[in-house]
Amino acid sequence: MFDKLAAVESRFEEICAKMSDPDVINDAGGFKALMKEHSRLEPIVDKYREYKEAVSRRDGAEEMLGSKGLDPELHELAEEELAEAKAAAESAAEELKILMLPKDPNDDRNVVVEIRGGAGGDEAALFAGTLYRMYSLYAEARRWRTEPVVVNETELGGYKEISFMIEGEGAYSRLKYESGVHRVQRVPETEAQGRIHTSTVTVAVLPEAEEIELNINPAELKIDTYRSGGAGGQHVNKTESAIRITHLPTGMVVECQDERSQLKNKEKAMKVLRSRLYEKMTAEQNAAIAGDRRAQVGTGDRSERIRTYNYPQGRVTDHRIGLTLYKLDAVLDGGLDDIIDPLIIYYRTKMLGQSEE
């Protein structure tokens, strides 16, 4: 591993030198690619340098302890330094093992997020809207771009279904753990007796598939146009701009009515269809390779109840890692990193254990 780390550090230093070259800076595409690689390697190199510094301290302390006639006070200090340096080196080495694990090939992709109200009727639809707001605020904080695709609103202001795209660096790497069943416990606004109701919402996070990766035969598509419903004024209702695409071999149906342009709606619907088919293809490949065991850790099972949002207690609990936070408002305002970061560590540690079996 350490031979690889030395090569990684050498490559990182090479990138740093190139990024200060005016010719490279003027090449927008090349510079962007270098920035991306720099961001990927930087945490590995930082931890590797931390490891080397700890090893150097450890070796220095051992050398001092091996000296004859060492002053008792200095001997005690050297023993303390040795213990601290050993612990720091061991900790850094374990973290490096995780950082050097093979990267999920989908991690740098944009995503399509699909949120649907489950058990609980109108209350589930309202909470679907709450989750949409939470993910939108999280994306905004990370300077990602969001764009709605399918919006199916209810009369009370919730969503039976809402699908939207999130575009930004590392979107899938951060959001892939959100797939699953989200449970909410609260007193609905329509509840006269103040009883707490439990409702569920399903979230699916799909990596956006590139057109070159998935060849869809146009002859296998049925494309229908219809008039959009909901808000949008007379133009929306009079123009058949909404698109419904049916993939005949699988029966998958994607609708889009967000844009006034039929062409733009078709483009968005095709992106969602491509992402769904890509996920289906990947799931089938993983199943063939690993049988019942998940080959790709942490992608999230949609049928799995992953998280509970308890309003009376101001509590959020992620059931996969037993994490409970009493900061519900902050989480719903987009503060998801306190949940996502521990999830990443958990699943990468789990992956490390599997790789060592």
Image (cartoon, helix red, strand yellow):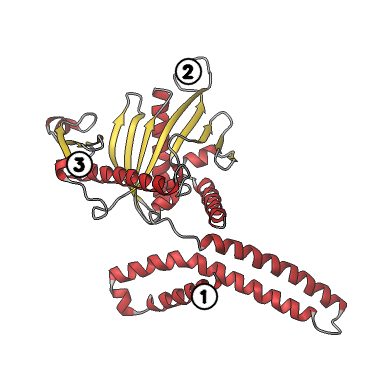
User: Which mark is first along the chain, 1 or 2?
Assistant: 1
Q: Which residue is drawn at 85% across and 75% down?
A: 73
Tag 2: amino acid: Glu
Q: Distance between the residues labelled 3 and 1?
A: 49 Å
Tell me if I can see residue 237 in this picture.
yes
Residue 88: mark: none
Q: How crowded is mark 2: few (under 14 residues within 10 Å), some or many (20 or more)?
A: few
Q: How far apart are marks 2 and 1 (CA)?
A: 62 Å
Which element type, helix, strand or loop, lies under badge 2?
loop
User: Which mark is first along the chain, 1 or 3?
Assistant: 1
Above or below 169: residue 307: above
Q: In this view, does 56 lie to the left or right of 10?
A: right
Which image quadrant for residue 60?
bottom right
Q: Where is residue 49 in the image (x, y as percent from the top left)?
A: 57, 72
Q: Which residue is drawn at 70% across and 68% down?
A: 86
The answer to whether marks 3 and 2 mark residues whose Cβ atoms lie closer than 8 Å is: no
Tag 3: amino acid: Asn
Which element type, helix, strand or loop, lies under badge 3?
helix
Mark 1 lies on residue: 6
Q: How many labels does the image show?
A: 3
Mark 3 lies on residue: 265
Q: Where is residue 196 in the image (x, y as percent from the top left)?
A: 53, 22
Tag 1: amino acid: Ala
Q: How far apart are marks 3 and 2 (CA)?
A: 38 Å
